[in-house]
Every structure is written in C-alpha cells, then in structure tokens.
Amino acid sequence: MRESWRWFGPSDPVTINDIRQTGVTDIVSALHTIPAGQIWPIEAIRQHKALIEDCEDGLAPLKWTVVESIPVHEDIKLARPGHEKFIEAWAVSMENLATCGIKTICYNFMPVIDWTRTDLKYKLPSGAYALRFDQKKFAAFDLYILKRDGAEADYNADEIAEAKEMFDGMDEAERAQLTDNIIAGLPGKMTESYGLEDFRAMLANYNDVDAAILRANLFAFLEQVLPRAEAAGVNLAIHPDDPPRDMLGLPRIICTADDLDILFAAQPSPSNGITLCVGTYSSRPDNDLPVMAKQFGPRIHFSHLRGVSRDTDEQRSFYEASHLDSDIDMIAVIQELLNEESRRKREAPDQEGIFIRPDHGLQMMDDIDKAGNPGYSGIGRLKGVAEIRGVIRALSAQN
C-alpha cells in the first residue's frame, strides 16, 4: 500500500520535515487558498508541489500524489443557472493536476458543510482527546440555537425533550462553542467560515432539493468530468457524507453500499471510484466495512483508515477511536485491501498500490496544548500510521 499523510500547506503546524520522519512516502494536499469554483493554475500547482517534493540531498523524498479536495461549488450541487462554468473550472483544475503528475482526486458532494462534529476535544479515559458527534447536542443546536424552520419534524417527542434539557444545561460560552464546532471552518472549508445567519441562508437554498434531485445533480456533474478524467488518466474518489445520514434538512446521497451501487450503475466509468473512509461509513451500524472493502475493491482509489466507537444507547453518537480500537474490524478491512492490491497486480504488475492514510488521530501527549486543524495533530496520526503499518506488515508476511 502507498502510505500517505494529509498536509494543509505552509501554515500546517505539522511540517513536511515532520512528516518525512513518519516514514510515509506520499502526501495528500490541496490548494486551500483558492476558493471553490476557481481554476487551480498549473503554476500554483507546481509551486505547491515543490514545497512538498524539493528537499536536501540525502533526505527521503516525498511525493504529492493525492488531492483532497477540489471543492465542488454549491451552484453545481444546486444546478443553478450558469453552474456549467464551475464544472468547467473543476475539470480544468483536474486536468492541470494531471499535467503535473497528480492523478488521484478525493472529493465530496456534501451540501453546505463537510464533516460535522459537536466536540473537537472530547476527553477519553486515557487523557487523550478525540473528535465526537453527540446526537443530543446536535439536536439542541438544530432546534434551539440554529432554530431551523421545520426542524421539529426530524425529531420525536422524546428527542425534542432531551435536546431542550441539553440546551438548558449549557451556558452561553458552551452554546457558542457548539455553534463554532458545527459550522466554523473545518478541513474542506479552509477558505471560509460561516456565521449563524449565513448558515441559515445556505441551508435554505436546499429547501426544495431532495436526495433524488441532489443525486441527479451529482450524476450530471460526473457526466461532464468523467470523460475528461479518463482521458487524463485521473481516478476520482468520492468521499462519503459525514455523518452518513440526512441532517439539518440536507439530503445525503453517499452513505451506504446501496448508494454506491446506484452511483456505479449510473456512472460506470473506471475513473469513477471511492475514498473508502472507514470511520465515516462505520458510524452507521448497517455498514459492514470488510464486506464493503471486498465488494467495492476495484473502485477503491484511496482509503482513510480510522474507526469510531458508537454509543451503546444512541448509535448516532460516536467518538473517533484509536485506529485499531473501534467498532469495526480494521484488520479485516486491511486484509481486503491487500487482497484487492494482489488482484490488481496479477492483472497489471506495474500498478500502483492503494493510497491510504491515517485519519483524524487523537490529540495526545505534547500535542494536547498545541493549535492545529481539528483531528490532524502529529502524534495521534503517527500512532495511527504505526498501528496500520504493523497490521500491513504482519498480514503481508502471512501471504
């Protein structure tokens, strides 16, 4: 497998030289300063690539091989008049990346927000901190802070009462922190963050958009970009919706194996693939990750290897566990990925391995008091990649 590491650019507190020490070989990155809908120029791509790949003689080289992500403009998701110009900009950016040798692109089609958590520093019994999604806190935000029109229809009477109790138990600082955690600039929204009024307005844009409409808009986008991806030798790897279910009145369309079956039936291009984000898919108990890894093996261009631990009494609530200590069998998932790699190499011995990376590591040890992107501290991800590497070496030795 191709071990990779996400780097957010020169402002990332985990530097390229830090990453080099982890032993990974590949970098996952993006041009976060370019707003959604604008073209990534070749020169800007080359400059960013040089920051990653230029190094002193004698140092282990790193290579920028995966993009995460080229943001998909909201007008594309809404199919607004004139959105074709944004599809063209996205496709040109993809082609410019391919010209520079970067041919695996992770992207998502989540309306308005990327991954959502209620707690960015949830304390574990070990003293380390994790990201957490708490369904009761989220309902309290939706019903009593955001006060979204029609939100009550998404909750039963007991859930509304629990949310009110949760809200009443928070002081103003806690309510403000919860709001920031849900809507402020998380990874994938590096160029902007929203205030509460902006957030309400953006959600309202989707009042008449259901899952069927959003899915049709995704397919229309892919119909335009997939032929060009094939021509450029690019693999597109869609990331699942996180959490993988409808929320805030927004439809979600990449949540389950059934959703992926629909996607590939509609758009069978070999360039149309997935990011197997184990943690995201496994936050739904009805997703069987080892089965999905086997079922969609040929479509897996990239994988985030992390897991979650769901609450026993509320399966929609979870925290992001250590990479090998979650609700899913990570060893079985990795075995299926290794099996898929073996299959590919039998067909084409010079094929690249599957790109993998540790995802959302714990905040621990010397990183606890350091500032950084939520979930992307250095030590927690180093622990994750070490665990994953050990599993891969052990399983590979048995084959």
Image (cartoon, grey):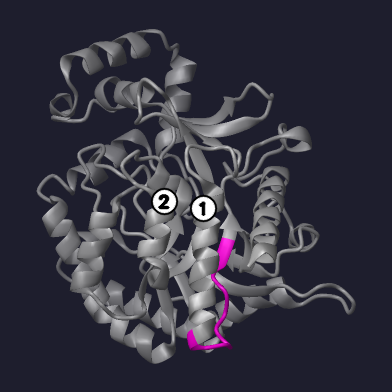
Q: Mark 1 is on which residue type?
A: Ala
Task: Give the extent of the magenta segment.
Answer: 347-356
Report the front residue among 31 and 55: 55
Task: Give the x, y percent position of residue 352.
Answer: 57, 80
Rendered position, 253 above or below 72 = above
Residue found at x 24% / y 57%: 259
Neighbours of disc 1 within 10 Å: few (<14), some (14-19), many (20+): some
Which quadrant of the rendered structure holds the C terminus?
bottom right
Q: Quadrant of residue 43?
A: bottom right
Residue found at x 37% / y 48%: 288
- Find the distance from the CA under tag 1 to the CA under tag 2: 9 Å
Evaluate if marks 1 and 2 touch, with contact meaning CB atoms under 8 Å apart: yes
**Disc 2 designates what residue?**
289
Q: Quadrant of residue 310?
A: top left
Can see residue 169?
Answer: yes
Can see residue 83?
Answer: no
In the rendered image, residue 355 lying in the magenta stretch gets the answer yes
Q: What secondary structure do most residues of the magenta stretch adopt?
A: loop
Task: Give the x, y percent position of residue 68.
Answer: 49, 63
First in sequence, mark 1 or 2: give its number.
2
Q: Secondary structure at mark 2?
A: helix
Give the label, 1 or 2, closer to the camera.
1
Residue found at x 60% / y 43%: 324
In the rendered image, residue 11 lying in the magenta stretch gets the answer no
**Disc 1 designates what residue?**
332
Report the front residue among 241 and 3: 3
Task: Give the x, y percent position of residue 12.
Answer: 66, 54
Rendered position, 55 above or below 347 = above
Q: How many marks?
A: 2
Toward the front, the furthest residue is: 398
